[in-house]
Image (cartoon, helix red, strand yellow):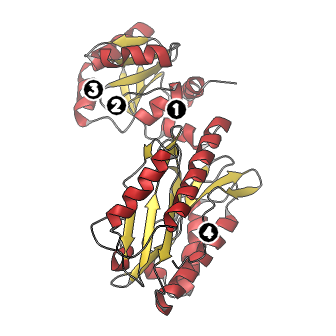
Amino acid sequence: MATRVERLQALFAPLSIDSFLVSSPSNQQYLVGASVMSGDGYLLVTAKRAVFITDARYQTELTQVIPQIPLVITRSYLQAVNDVLEADGATVLGIEDQLTIREFEWLDEHLMTDIVPLADVADELRQVKEADELAAIRRATQLTSAGLEALFTVLKPGMTERQVAQWLEQWMQEHGATGTSFPTIVASGVRSAWPHGQASDKQLATGELVTIDCGFYVDDYTSDVTRTVALGDPGSELKAAYQAVQAAQSAIVAAVAPSVTGDELDRIGRDFLTERGYGEAFIHGTGHGIGLDIHEGPNIGRGWPDVMKANEVITIEPGVYLAGRGGIRIEDDILVTSDGHEVLTTVPRNLIIL
């Protein structure tokens, strides 16, 4: 089986390049099993080899973690890139769009090779997950599901949104998560109509909806799960909106399979909600891939042509947001299988009234 670096090298001829500079830490991690902080070095892949260019802060760690990858230890990262390209006879270098303007300008001025900006080359290699990646994502989604269910046993009026987020994050860390993939969203009452409402000092109150959107890393791979619950009866209007979102999500999930496009999945949920009078209140895309990053391909939304493939893991997260009243989002992590799909998250999807 070809290594991940070899799979990248196999793309050189179709892309008309003979080398590729990996600046994204997540892509470095994927390709060779280790990374440095953004701006602290590069993984350079030529037709002949892969070389990690960084400084002495990472030397001991990388020597132990990826002993098979040669290191160039220097503070002149870009000059070292030039030196390796010249030594390997490279003539056309592909670069990622994470490079800063300053980095690009240096390369453009000093490199003897041509430069070709190429977005998403390594990112697209990451979309279809291997067995060990799927196992890590399963652990992340299972732990996050357990964490949310534990949270629901303590959630009550009087807690602040920030206390809710801190409780969940502490529980997850105590049970094996290594960190969050984004700041945990807790938005209650009228703030639940803010899709990305960050946890605040607002206190939860009886009769409110509470939306919790969280992602946690386990073994380098993340989950991404959202649930909206109620603290007492939220009223008929919000309960009807919840039922519409739940039904829309079920319809979208049922259609997940290889060959369906992101646009087609989005249209299923958007048409469903529009027919029930909520079309204008669904104000974001339907989902995205997850893995080493919280947002990866494929994309699921209006106009996206991305075709689902077996062993991709995606989110399905329709929502309805009623300004001044409240909002609902239900998000699950879905594995695309060879003949359909598997829902990885296990938190109940019906409206939980605490």
Left or right, 184 with respect to 137, comes to left
At mark 1, the secondary structure is helix
For marks 4 and 2, give the CA distance.
37 Å
For marks 1 and 2, give the CA distance.
14 Å
Residue 42 location (% of width, % of height): 37, 24
* Closer to the eye: label 4 or 1: 4
Q: Amino acid at mark 2?
A: Met
For marks 3 and 1, give the CA distance.
27 Å
**Disc 4: CA contacts within 10 A as few (<14), some (14-19) or many (>=20):** few
Q: Specify the quadrant of the image occupied by residue 251.
A: bottom right
Q: Which label is found at residue 30? A: 1
Q: What residue appears at the point 43 percent right and 37 percent down from the top-left corner?
A: 118
Residue located beneath label 2 in the image: 37
For marks 3 and 4, give the CA distance.
53 Å
Residue 4 location (% of width, % of height): 58, 27
Left or right, 264 with respect to 41, comes to right
- Quick check: can you spot residue 190? yes
Residue located beneath label 4 in the image: 348
Comes first in the chain, label 4 or label 2: 2
Q: Amino acid at mark 1?
A: Tyr
Residue located beneath label 3 in the image: 108
- How many labels, in total? 4
The answer to whether the residue labelled 1 contacts the one labelled 2, judged by CB atoms less than 8 Å apart, is no
